[in-house]
Image (tube, grey):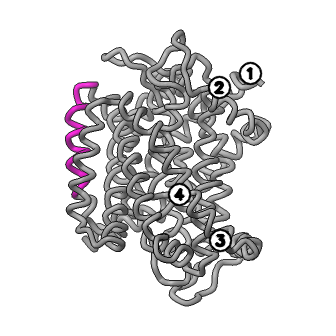
Amino acid sequence: METLTQLLNSISSFVWGPVILALLLGTGAYLMAGLLFMPIRQLPAAFVLLWRGRKSNDLDNGEISPFSALMTSLAATIGTGNIAGVATAIFLGGPGAIFWMWLTALVGMATKYAEAVLAVKYRELDDNGAYVGGPMYYIKNGLGKNWQWLAFLFSFFGAIAAFGIGNTIQANSVADALNSTLNIPAWQSGLVMMVIVAAVLLGGIKRIAQVASKLVPFMGIAYVAGAGIIIIQRLDSVPTALQLIVNDAFTGTAAAGGFAGAGIMAAIRFGVARGVFSNEAGLGTAPIAHAAAKTNDPVRQGKIAMLGTFIDTIIVCTMTALVIILTGSWTSGETGASLSAYAFRMGLPGYGEYVVSFGLAVFALTTLLGWSYYGERCAAYILGVGVIPWYRVAWVLAIPVGAMTDLNFLWLLADVLNGLMAIPNLIALLLLSPVVFKLSRRKT
């Protein structure tokens, strides 16, 4: 295990080194500039579209409503990245890592927009008559036969990466939080999650979307409300906390209490990595869900899709970070979900840790559902729709295994797989950017 960990550390250092970080941020910045900052300018209008998209037009092609597509996407993104991921970023990179999470999210709005536009434009019907799409399809249908190898690479990495970021990490974080709060053994948490996920997966994307459309708004409001109470109680310290985040992003963070200190590169590396883990902009996963939306307008769905990055990172992750910093918990030496639970316990004595534990449980449950769809679509692209039942069985069985596995190793593996998955998608986005710009100019 130690040898494997060292190997993964070496791969992770390359995957999340300057080249890939520049590719992630550079692609987002290029798309934002090419769109003339439309994702930021039309943010209010996108929220209006989201509200109107709660009901789909029966004349539109697709499987689920535009609203349900976003909720399915958010179900996969709002999870441990917002609770454990933010805490891990601060633990490894200091408060300055949050600044780089923000930057990743802002340019990531353009990336997510482009992904969804291409996903709807180049989607197709599978052998079961369902609309499917995502990076593998916009590579196949947009770039042509010479780029089929790139579509294969994305699908291969995606089918495997799903078991890291979308399955074992989620199960492990829930088990860790429930064990530290309620002393529930990890194996029991794993079995309960396994049964619930198995029951929902029997209904496919429509059942997943139905569950996500109900749980995501509820859990998001409940968690933000808990964090909001803590922040309001310390409102006078918020400017100082924000100043700490910005300053440390460019100077590094000195050791303090249980915090070992971190340099500027650590802040950038872990801020961008955890930012991508949180909102998944650039990974190519969200467009798999948006491709199933009942819409014939790629640009409209793109605007709805970009809200996922804004809600996930700019709102939810920022509130988690402020709670951790305002309560002084970031110097406690804790990390992951335990750090977030400790911060909420400090901010809301008596019940704060339960907000995190139960919030994380619901967050992670919906993430397990959303990512199961991403993974099975990647597997089906390579092996055909016949693999889907077998993939679901493997998915369900992996949950209790993840709940009882070492957390640090799982985070490392997820980081590596995320990076490998992002590369084919980012290449495709750059090559197909003229299509995105052309479609967007017609609508704006």
Q: Earlier in the sequence, mark 3 or mark 2?
A: 3
The residue that mark 3 highlights is 96
Please state the extent of the stretch shown in magenta in the rendering. Answer: 385-400
Does residue 389 belong to the magenta stretch? yes
Residue lying at the far bottom of the rendered structure: 257
- Image coords of residue 371 (percent x, y): 39, 43
Q: Secondary structure at mark 2?
A: helix
Q: To which residue does mark 2 refer?
A: 300
Relative height, residue 297 to residue 242 (above, below): above
What amino acid type should be assigned to the residue bearing mark 4? Tyr
> Which badge, 2 or 1, comes first in the chain's sequence?
2
The residues bearing labels 1 and 4 have C-alpha atoms spaced at a distance of 36 Å
Q: Measured from the top left, where is residue 178 in percent x and y?
A: 33, 66
User: Quick check: 37 left or right of 365?
Assistant: right
Residue 426: x percent and y percent? 55, 41
- Residue 129, by quadrant, is top left
